[in-house]
Image: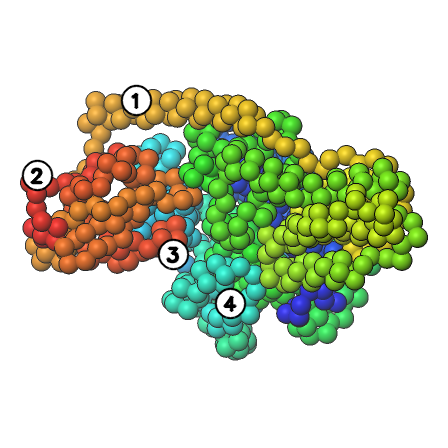
Amino acid sequence: MSHEDFPTENHAVVTCGLPYANGDLHVGHLRTYVGGDVFARALRKLGQRTAFVSGSDMHGTPVAVNAEKEGTDPETFALRWHETYEETFPRFSVEFDNYGHTHDETNTELTREIVRTLDEEGYVYEKEIMVAYDAEADQYLPDRYVEGTCPYCGAKARGDECDEGCQRHLEPGEVEDPVSIVTGNPAEYRERTHKFFRVSELQGYLQGFIDRLEGTANARNQPREWIEGELQDWCITRDMEWGIDYPGDGVAPEEQRNGDGDSAERRSADNSSGRSPREETVDGEDDLVLYVWVDAPIEYVSSTKQYTERVGADVYDWEAAWKGESASGSADGPESGGEIVHVIGRDIIQHHTVFWPAMLRAAGYNEPRAVMASGFVTLGGKGFSTSRDRAVWADEYLDEGFDPDLLRYYIATNGGFQQDVDFSWEKFQERVNGELVGTVGNFVYRSLLFAHRNYGGAPADVAGVSDEVRERVEGAIADFGEAVNDYSVRKVGEAAVRLAQFGNEYIQRNEPWKLTDDEPERAAQVIYDCVGIAKAIAVLFEPVAPGTCERLWEGLNEDGSVHEAGLGAALEPPVGSFGEPTEPFEKIPDERVDALNEKLEARVAAATADEEAEEREEADASADDGDFEPLAESRISFDEFQALDLRVGEVLAAEGIEGADKLAKLTVDIGVEERQIVAGIKQLHDLDDLVGERVVVVANLEKAELFGVESNGMLLAAGEQADILTTHGDATPGTKVR
């Protein structure tokens, strides 16, 4: 890659994180796919040769678990969702050059090839580890087949990820208090041999890589704790049958992994720079499949390769992008590599900035130039909850008859890309009516309607746009290019909207309707300028609103497609005659919003009632059975207990954390100071009622970061319903609990 400003001479590839093929898409999912599509379109506008690729993630335990619940095999289950995504993305104008999936032949073979290379280069070794095991089902429990507690923050964790707390990737054996989702019984840890990728030996390289990485600040900063700390090796196999088989044996055990002198020397140089889990018995020797996060990102390469196979290397050369060489095999060194940009959700930053670049480096591929990590989408200030149907689904949005460009604009320009975006029908209406209808639509429609009625199109015999308008369009083009190089999809959209704002001010200031009789030449110039601005808006706004801008382009009677028009077309003179325009956008009336809110609230209430009823039934059953956790067999000493600094605290403030379903942020007075504490009580307590409560706090617990919020202590609570421990009397905040 070059790290020069876009456009460069290199091939660029823009990827979006692969959706798990296991459920419907909602508008929260669309944040990254719309963002990736906007960025890829904007690169092409600059003249950058670009491939926009992704695919469905077919493997892993989420797919296997849900397929088993449905009573079907994982391949059939995942393929059905893959086909759904293939149909859904284009309906939102998310136009991938290639959309594959991880189970196809291309990705299977390329994954095996890359893993063999890691093996041959000495980056893979075997190690005995502790793996969760369900004795009743007589099977090992990979990833989402086991639930428990995150060892880092104490939140509920599922297998390989603390998805309700600190968002950390978790290795097999790390989840505390493991429970099997197969039988619901406590799981036990048993020793098992697995394959490991030596990420730790690439730590020096990764430290340099993260300094070079471009993109959003969260993608550059979040992984530093890992890369600059004690970087652990990565378990790359799982005890499953659904996935890509590990390609052959021959891997050295851990104690022999430094025996190859040549490989060790090379590594030292690098360091400076259809089924459920396997049901064999414990003693059975069975093959392993690759961890889903091995083959999933390789789909980026596979999908690019499939694109080349379809269009030819003369149109786009996947090897030039991923290997820094042409199809003929020539290479010009590191500067000849492609410009690889990953557009992802922030919950998978570590995978894309630690594991993935390490794999690419060890296998001889180019590193990513940039990672753009989006924030989450919330709904009315609260996190999406698919279980409680608290979401605006992609199909639901389209079924309401809304233009996809409205949603694209809302989620692309509502705040910075790494910030959370709150969706509500009221805010959606406000942005559509105010900015799209009131600013962009108002200027385009009034200008073109006046031009059509008075001149039959752009006025003839005008030499070109005025100097003032040319300078303003040139400024918008410069803003657009700067936005791309800042990796800001919001600013890409704003370049056109600000040009429309100028257009509204320009036509209002010059009042051409007053000039047509007394100053016809000046009137013609003003309207010609306005038509030129409208054409420039069509070019600049196309990445965000491609359907609307194509209709505008056709309405202007321009040749070709606006999708193929480069930025230079924004300064080209309009063609001349065109027909009567239509309004680009329609207002959303208040009664429509009221109806949408009623429909959403009724759906959420029904789903919530069903879920709460199930929870009560489970709680009653547990109470009837006396189903309590057994007492711990191991004992601690009095000194160990005394090491806990338990303090009485008073809750001064409590509020939910935006984007987190269960987490709340509390300000607690513990006598000597005020502490900020994050607790998983958002859905279980009325937070306003907690203010003034006396609670018990673990004051000497290590600090943790949960959902991007620092937690300095732990609130003590009992049971699944988080019954908060309070004091019987009015103990003063700061009093020690003994």
Which residue is label 3 attached to?
Answer: 128
| Mark in front: 2 vs 3 | 2
Q: Residues within 10 Å of mark 4 (few under 14, many from 20)?
A: many
Residue beneath the point at 41% across and 48% down: 161
Q: Residues within 10 Å of mark 1 (few under 14, many from 20)?
A: few
Which residue is label 1 attached to?
Answer: 617
Q: Earlier in the sequence, mark 1 or mark 3?
A: 3
Q: Earlier in the sequence, mark 4 or mark 1?
A: 4
Q: Earlier in the sequence, mark 1 or mark 2?
A: 1
Whether the residues at callouts 2 and 3 have beta carbons within 8 Å, the answer is: no
Element under label 1? helix
| Mark in front: 4 vs 2 | 2
Calculate the distance from the C-alpha at mark 1 to the C-alpha at mark 3: 41 Å
In the image, residue 537 above or below residue 323: above
Residue 607's disc is none
Residue beneath the point at 19% across and 58% down: 673
Which residue is label 2 attached to?
Answer: 728
Mark 2 is on which residue type? His
Mark 4 is on which residue type? Ile
Point out residue 43 in the picture as x, y percentages from the top left corner.
70, 57
Whether the residues at callouts 4 and 1 have beta carbons within 8 Å, the answer is: no
Residue beneath the point at 57% across and 44% down: 411
| Mark in front: 1 vs 3 | 1
- 311 or 176: which is nearer to us? 311
How many numbered marks are there? 4
Which residue is label 4 attached to?
Answer: 210
Mark 3 is on which residue type? Glu
